[in-house]
Amino acid sequence: MNTGPRLDWKPADVPGEVDWPIQDIARMTGTTSRTLRHYEHIGLLAPSRTGFNGYRHYDADALVRLQRILLLRELGLGLPAIKDVLDRSGGDATGALRTHLGWLRAEQERIGRQITSVTNTLEKLEGGEQLMAEDMFNGFDHTQYKEEVEQRWGANAYAEGDKWWRSMSDDEKSEWQRNMQQLCSDWSAAADRGVDPDSGEAQQLAQRQFDWLAGIPGTPGASRGGPTKEYFVGLGEVYVADPRFAANYGGQAGAEFVRDAITVYAERNL
């Protein structure tokens, strides 16, 4: 079963004139020929040549660019943002990939700390030991996302959100996290039951999501009562594109349910 784009492939070490047909690239990367043609249509990824039968072919340079696209998609960037990043980096594929590698290693390290933190909490709970708050939240430092947030939504969005978060007491932070976790749990439960995104229940959840975002300074539109339509709908796409967000809603299917429900909400209300 296809579970998403594969990032463990690499172009073969072959002469530059060798290329691969679109069907092979789709199979190797876990994407589709339709997606690759869409990338071409929006100017994101051009084939190195088109055969007499109309089939696209991609050389090693095109595959390196495609790998960068898939990496940025995994980080949750939308296609316009990805095109901007690639255009700004120019032909320095090596430097860009080193930057991507740094992001991935930082994320790997953060997840490792979270695993250790949760494992220690479980061991202490099962052993009846005293919990230490400073140990429980190792790996949950929001500042690690500073560069990513600024790249997606601007420096002001991060600065305002960071100021708001630091102004809260430990109890307030814990309460906010519990509310967030409850909302994510309610979304997951509704998705598991096959609730229609257009239903009253799903729309109530979308309203709660809207209100939750409205309470976070730095959210585009929050100062005017709630997130903008563009931001709200775009965030739904991020939930689906980024496995880190999708995990909050029970996985890919849950994230797609959230996206569809908030899209309906946005079309009706924003």
Image (spheres, rainbow, N blue to C red):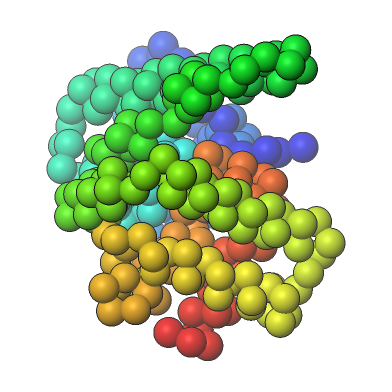
Q: Which residue is at a point 19% across and 45% down the rendered structure image? A: 87
Q: Where is residue 41 in the image (x, y as percent from the top left)?
A: 38, 60
Q: Is residue 143 above or below residue 85?
A: above
How many circles with numbers are drawn on the protein?
Answer: 0
Which quadrant is home to the N terminus? top right
Q: Is residue 41 left or right of residue 25?
A: left
Q: Is residue 163 above or below residue 137?
A: below
Q: Can residue 68 be seen in this view?
A: no
Q: Which residue is at a point 53% across and 39% down the rendered structure image? A: 244
Q: Which residue is at a point 26% across and 25% down the rendered structure image? A: 99
Q: In this view, does 248 lie to the left or right of 152?
A: right
Q: Position of residue 28 (x, y in %)?
A: 59, 30
Q: Work out whether residue 124 or residue 217 is closer to the camera in this orientation and state it.
A: 124
Which quadrant is home to the C terminus? bottom left
Q: Position of residue 161 (x, y in %)?
A: 28, 52
Q: Which residue is at a point 25% across and 38% down the rendered structure image? A: 147
Q: Where is residue 265 in the image (x, y as percent from the top left)?
A: 55, 79
Q: Work out whether residue 154 or residue 53 is closer to the camera in this orientation and state it.
A: 154
Q: Can residue 221 be seen in this view?
A: yes
Q: Work out whether residue 127 or residue 71 is closer to the camera in this orientation and state it.
A: 127
Q: Is residue 201 above or below residue 169?
A: below
Q: Which residue extends farthest right?
A: 193
Q: Work out whether residue 63 or residue 212 is closer to the camera in this orientation and state it.
A: 212
Q: In this view, does 46 lie to the left or right of 52?
A: left
The quarter of the picture where residue 91 lies is top left
The quarter of the picture where residue 69 lies is top left
